[in-house]
């Protein structure tokens, strides 16, 4: 059977369903899918967003702090070096990608990128790191693009359209809606009571990891703006991460923030 190996430097809980479905679909086509992932950094572990798949293979990542970020070396298990296709994440800091990108590969092995095409959160979108990322766009045999926006970026960079697959990679919103829909009127009444929100109170919900790139200062300022115009308003923040203390601190002066 043909073998496909996907590398994720860490496994996120909202991707586990996707990987299960991919594995099932590959099996129907006579393809064995292997997922390899490592552990998060200490800063990332604070987000509590790790996933678990019994069939995935865990390796030990090596991290080196460089400024506010960490560069990563993720081992490539020897038993999977006969893979027909290897899919890696498109991130400059993944040092283990460079031997695959820049050195000769085994003849039967094809390499694919999974990513955005750009770092949309980069403070310097025209800087060296983004130019370096663009330089490597064409070093892979295939692209698994997050969205149609990524596809347009790749076409602008000169990558051939016939070698791009758009994943529409996103949160599993169907499962999220199912979770929300499982709460009845009595459950909701208890939750409203717990957060001090009456039956007529308007509630905003933010659900996600809490870290600087999420611009939580903007979220809180927006909450201030809404509360000025709508006193009977509560914003509920669900999540954790390096910026969790920032949100908890904001609740001291904002009784509408939970």
Image: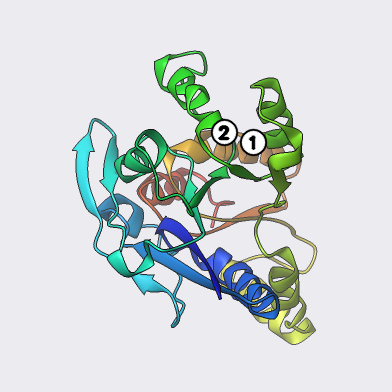
Q: Left of 157 or right of it: where is 139?
A: left
> In which quadrant of the rendered view does residue 57 lie?
bottom left
190 sits left or right of 125 in the view: right
Residue 155 image offset from top left, x and y in percent: 71, 26
Local packing at callout 1 (Cα closer than 10 Å; few below 14, some 14-19, many 20+) is: few
Report the Cα–Cα distance between label 2 and label 1: 6 Å
Residue at 70%, 42% in the rendered image: 164
Residue 169 percent location from the top left of the image? 66, 53
Of the residues tagged 2 and 1, which is closer to the observer?
Answer: 2
Circle 2 Cα neighbour tier, 10 Å, few/some/many (<14 / 14–19 / ≥20): few
Q: Give above or below for 245 relative to 150.
A: below
Residue 117 can be seen in this image: yes
User: What residue would you read off at disc 1?
Assistant: 222
State which quadrant residue 104 falls in.
top left
Instruction: Give me the disc on residue 218.
Output: 2
Question: Residue 2 location, x and y as percent?
Answer: 56, 69
Q: Is residue 95 left or right of residue 109?
A: left
Callout 2 touching callout 1 (CB < 8 Å): yes
On-image quarter of the C terminus: bottom right
131 vs 29, nearest the viewer: 29
Is residue 120 in sight in this rendering? no
| Residue at the extreme front | 107
Report the colour scheme. Answer: rainbow
Which residue is located at x 44 percent, y 14 percent? 127
């Amino acid at each position: 059977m043909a073998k496909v190996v996907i590398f994720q430097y860490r496994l996120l809980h909202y991707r586990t369903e996707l990987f299960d479905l991919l594995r099932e679909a590959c099996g129907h086509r006579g393809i064995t899918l292997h997922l390899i992932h490592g552990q998060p950094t200490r800063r990332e572990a604070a987000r509590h967003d790790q996933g678990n798949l019994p069939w995935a293979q865990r390796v030990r990542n090596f991290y080196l702090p460089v400024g506010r970020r960490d560069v990563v070396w993720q081992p490539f298990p020897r038993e999977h070096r006969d893979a027909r296709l290897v899919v890696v994440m498109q991130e400059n800091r993944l040092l283990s990608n460079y031997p695959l990108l820049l050195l000769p590969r085994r003849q039967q092995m094809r390499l694919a990128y999974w990513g955005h095409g750009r770092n949309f959160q980069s403070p310097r979108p025209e800087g060296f790191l983004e130019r370096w990322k663009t330089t490597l766009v064409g070093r892979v045999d295939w692209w698994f693009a997050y969205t149609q926006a990524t596809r347009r970026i790749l076409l602008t960079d000169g990558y051939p359209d016939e070698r791009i697959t758009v994943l529409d990679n996103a949160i599993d919103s169907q499962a999220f809606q199912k979770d929300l829909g499982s709460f009845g009127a009595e459950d909701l009444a208890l939750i409203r009571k717990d957060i001090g929100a009456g039956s007529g109170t308007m509630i905003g919900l933010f659900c996600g990891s809490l870290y600087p790139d999420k611009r939580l200062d903007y979220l809180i300022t927006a909450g201030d703006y809404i509360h000025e115009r709508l006193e009977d308003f509560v914003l509920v923040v669900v999540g954790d991460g390096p910026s969790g203390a920032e949100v908890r601190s904001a609740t001291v002066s904002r009784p509408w923030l939970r």
